[in-house]
Each structure stands twice: as structure tokens, then as C-alpha cells.
Image: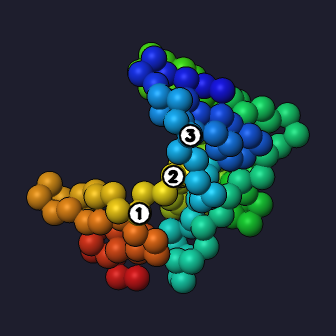
Amino acid sequence: MLATENGLSIGLGDSEVTSLSVNGTEILSDAFSGFLVRDVAEKNHNGIYSFVPEGYSVPTAFRAAQPTLGLNLSADYKENGNHIAVTGTIKDATDSTEGRSVQLSYSLPVSASGWKWSTELNVEQEVSCGKASNVYKSFGENY
């Protein structure tokens, strides 16, 4: 379990978040969690993949592969006062000499339905299920 001095704690499993609490109150949901990646050049934009932990991976020193996309990931977690720092490297595991464009994200398993967030300073959107594509559309991608 990793914890901050201001009440956030996170438990890590092989490749996912197993516990997430604020001031002792568990807020974990059954949503996907951990590192997720997609190939930006993929035509249908539907492929979002998780990583498969390597045998020597431990939760705070995550080592994993994404075989479908040919990627390797290493990430280290560290308690750091009022936050948890995550540093890492993603590498192309293919023999390709071409550049790659991937989007790496880290998902926390919380139910954010009803929360609000902004893509612009003065524009709020309500968070709801199935609306992730609106993020890309608001930034000008033609999905």
C-alpha cells in the first residue's frame, strides 16, 4: 500500500489498482485500472490494451509487455509527501525502424459519473459512461 500525507492511499496488484481510498474511505469501483495504451495510427481507434506483467514484476516496480502492439513498459511508484510519483519508460519491442505514435494513460478505478471536468478554461462537461470519444472530438480529431 502506498500512501500520501494528505490521506490518499493506493494498493497495487499485478497490473491493476486493488485499493483506492481517501481519508480511509474506499472509493474503488470495478472499472478498468492501471496502464492502458492505444496505437494512435490504428484506423478504427477502438483498440485500447492493458499490459501483461513480466514474471519479475512487483507492484511498485511494474515491468510489463503489450504483445499485440509490441511494447514494453517499466514504471516505478514512490510515495512523495502529498503525492505518489510514477516514473517510467515505454519502449517499442518490434524491429520497426519507423516512428510510433501511442497514447499511454493511467486509469484509476473510480466512478466519476456526475463529476465535471473541462477541456477548456470556461467549458465544463459532465462525466458519464461512454463519452471518452468526446474528449478527442473536442480537440479536433475526426473520429
The alpha-carbon separation of the residues under discs 3 and 2 comes to 10 Å
Mark positioned earlier in the residue sequence (3 or 2): 3
Cβ atoms at labels 1 and 2 below 8 Å apart: no
Camera sees residue 73: no
Q: Nearer the viewer, mark 3 or mark 2?
A: 3
- Percent across and percent down for residue 93 are 72, 53
Where, quadrant-wise, is the C terminus in this rendering? Answer: bottom left
Mark positioned earlier in the residue sequence (3 or 1): 3
- Amino acid type at circle 2 is Val
- Percent across and percent down for residue 63 are 74, 39
Q: Residue 138's image quarter?
A: bottom left
- Residue named by callout 2: 110
- Percent across and percent down for residue 94 are 73, 58
Q: How many residues crowd mark 3 within 10 Å: few (<14), some (14–19), many (20+)? A: some
Camera sees residue 124: yes
- Amino acid type at circle 3 is Glu
Cβ atoms at labels 3 and 2 below 8 Å apart: no
Q: How many residues crowd mark 1 within 10 Å: few (<14), some (14–19), many (20+)? A: few
Instruction: Report helix, strand or loop for mark 2.
Output: loop
- Residue named by callout 3: 26
Q: Residue furthest front?
A: 25
- Residue named by callout 1: 113
Q: Residue at x 72, y 33 (%)?
A: 59
On the rendered structure, is 15 left or right of 7? right
